Amino acid sequence: MFGVLKGYENRQDPDLMNEIVLAYLGDCVYELYVRNLSVASGKIKTRELSRISAEHSKAAFQARAMKALEGQLTEAETQVMKRARNKRITSKPKNAEPMEYKLATAFEAVIGYLYVKGEFGRMEWLIERALTKIPEEKKDEGEKEERE
């Protein structure tokens, strides 16, 4: 399914692509994974599926994912992440703080970068880590607050 670009001879070098274009593509790929996750939850009401998807697609969630994964990125992925994170914001982010928005964009750019490179295994590993590690960290934080 994600091998769409395998036979595409004219694809661009992802190291030279605009980081916002990579983030755009990464957002699409990540959203598909999130929607698959919501369907795999066993819920059948679209309202519940949308709630699960929205929770994992928010800039705040993606920003936490980027922070958690930052130390596990390769050198090339780190370069993409930094380029996207440091890109000047030209519009006011809705429902997110500017730094959250920048980190979310960086996360999406890394996913897009790996997609274009055809490194689907690595891309899926990072997405799975984001979707499993971040909810665990949030749960741990909640337990700490309850104890205090």
Image (cartoon, helix red, strand yellow):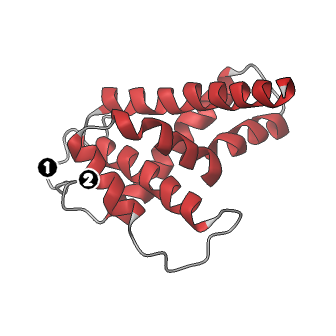
* Residue at mark 1 to residue at mark 2: CA–CA distance: 25 Å
What is the x, y in percent for residue 100? 58, 58
Look at 22% across and 38% down and name the residue there.
6
What is the x, y in percent for residue 129? 48, 27
Look at 49% across and 43% down and name the residue there.
67
Relative placement, left or right, of 45 versus 126 is right
Q: Is residue 1 visible?
A: no
- Which residue carries the number 1 mark? 9
Look at 71% across and 21% down and name the residue there.
41
What is the x, y in percent for residue 78? 29, 47
- Which residue carries the number 2 mark? 79
Looking at marks 1 and 2 on the same chain, the residue that comes earlier in the sequence is marked by 1
Residue 37 figure quarter: top right
Q: Which amino acid is tagged 1?
A: Glu
Residue nearest the observer in this picture, 14 or 99? 99
What is the x, y in percent for residue 27? 49, 51
Say few, some or many: other residues with alpha carbon within 10 Å of mark 1 (under 14 / 14 to 19 / 20 or more): few
Residue nearest the observer in this picture, 126 or 68? 68
Q: Are marks 1 and 2 in contact (CB under 8 Å)?
A: no
Q: In terms of secondary structure, where does tag 2 sit? A: helix
Q: In terms of secondary structure, where does tag 1 sit? A: loop
Look at 55% across and 49% down and name the residue there.
63
